[in-house]
């Protein structure tokens, strides 16, 4: 099979396995909805700055819970079997695509429930939706790469936090600025720099994953 066929097969496999069990995705959905409800009970009404910050905090921790188990849920025997039949680049790309799909689902549910619970103050819904889309893909690519490194280092959660911190902090800064521009309804040309930075982060992260993971996979 070609790499594209291997990626498609692996993504389909992950979707089927998740659909059969549903434990992980249901737990994460419960976390998102309960966190939104707790925030509403605590604040009732918030200004746009707090509204934006709370949303990205919820999405950040939901992504950590969703993606941190990307590689640990595969048994060593299954990983050895994959090693003999497929390319390591197909494995990491399939994980990134699958986690991006999961994050898009979670972010959509979080945004809808958050907008219903709190009044939606977004001035430019299309730009804010684009920020959520790019943020979901960015979280998926960054945490998938870090999760793969952490899994090969004995699933050290401290290592995952240390490795993801230098990337996540500037990523969150750019996402918050972009989404704040959407909240304020600013002209979209004012946000072109943030959009380009997010696209660049995704391209660089995916490229590094494709270059680095084959060496991790060899171990």
Image (tube, helix red, strand yellow):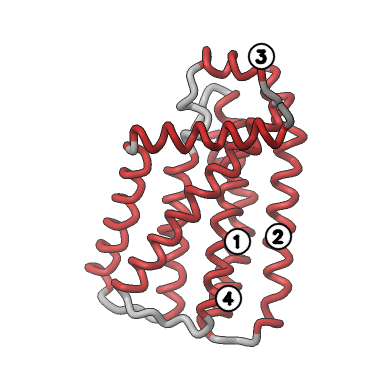
Mark 2, secondary structure of its residue: helix
Mark 2 highlights which residue?
199
Judged left or right of residue 189, residue 154 is: left
Judged left or right of residue 206, residue 119 is: left
- Residue 107 on image: x %, y %: 45, 59
Q: Please report contact status of discs 4 and 3: CB closer than 8 Å, yes or no.
A: no
N-terminal label among 1 and 2:
1
Numbered badge on residue 134: 1
Q: Please report contact status of discs 1 and 2: CB closer than 8 Å, yes or no.
A: yes
Mark 3 highlights which residue?
84
N-terminal label among 3 and 1:
3
| Cα gap from disc 2 to disc 4, whole angstroms | 15 Å
Q: Assign the C terminus to one quadrant of the image.
A: top right
| Cα gap from disc 2 to disc 3, whole angstroms | 34 Å
Snapshot quadrant of residue 21? top left
Q: Please report contact status of discs 2 and 4: CB closer than 8 Å, yes or no.
A: no
Judged left or right of residue 58, residue 193 is: right
Q: Assign the N terminus to one quadrant of the image.
A: top right
Q: Residue at x 29, y 50 (%)?
A: 30
| Cα gap from disc 4 to disc 1, whole angstroms | 11 Å
N-terminal label among 2 and 4:
4
| Cα gap from disc 4 to disc 3, whole angstroms | 44 Å
Numbered badge on residue 127: 4
- Residue 115 on image: x %, y %: 36, 73
Mark 1, secondary structure of its residue: helix
């Amino acid at each position: 099979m070609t790499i594209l066929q291997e990626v498609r097969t692996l993504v389909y496999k992950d979707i089927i396995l998740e659909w059969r069990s549903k434990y992980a995705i249901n737990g994460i959905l419960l976390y998102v909805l309960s966190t939104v409800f707790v925030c509403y009970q605590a604040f009732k009404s918030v200004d746009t700055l707090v509204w934006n910050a709370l949303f990205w905090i919820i999405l950040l921790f939901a992504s950590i819970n969703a993606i941190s188990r990307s590689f640990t849920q595969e048994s060593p025997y299954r990983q050895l079997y994959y090693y003999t039949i497929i390319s390591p680049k197909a494995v990491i790309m399939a994980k990134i695509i699958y986690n991006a799909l999961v994050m898009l689902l979670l972010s959509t549910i979080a945004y809808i429930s958050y907008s219903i619970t709190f009044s939606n103050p977004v001035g430019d819904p299309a730009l804010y939706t684009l920020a959520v889309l790019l943020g979901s893909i960015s979280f998926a690519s960054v945490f998938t790469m870090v999760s793969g490194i952490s899994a090969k280092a004995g699933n050290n959660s401290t290592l995952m936090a240390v490795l993801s911190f230098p990337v996540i902090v500037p990523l969150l800064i750019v996402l918050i600025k972009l989404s704040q521009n959407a909240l304020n309804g600013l002209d979209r040309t004012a946000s072109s720099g943030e959009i380009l930075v997010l696209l660049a982060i995704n391209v660089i992260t995916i490229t590094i994953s494709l270059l680095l993971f084959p060496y991790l996979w060899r171990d």
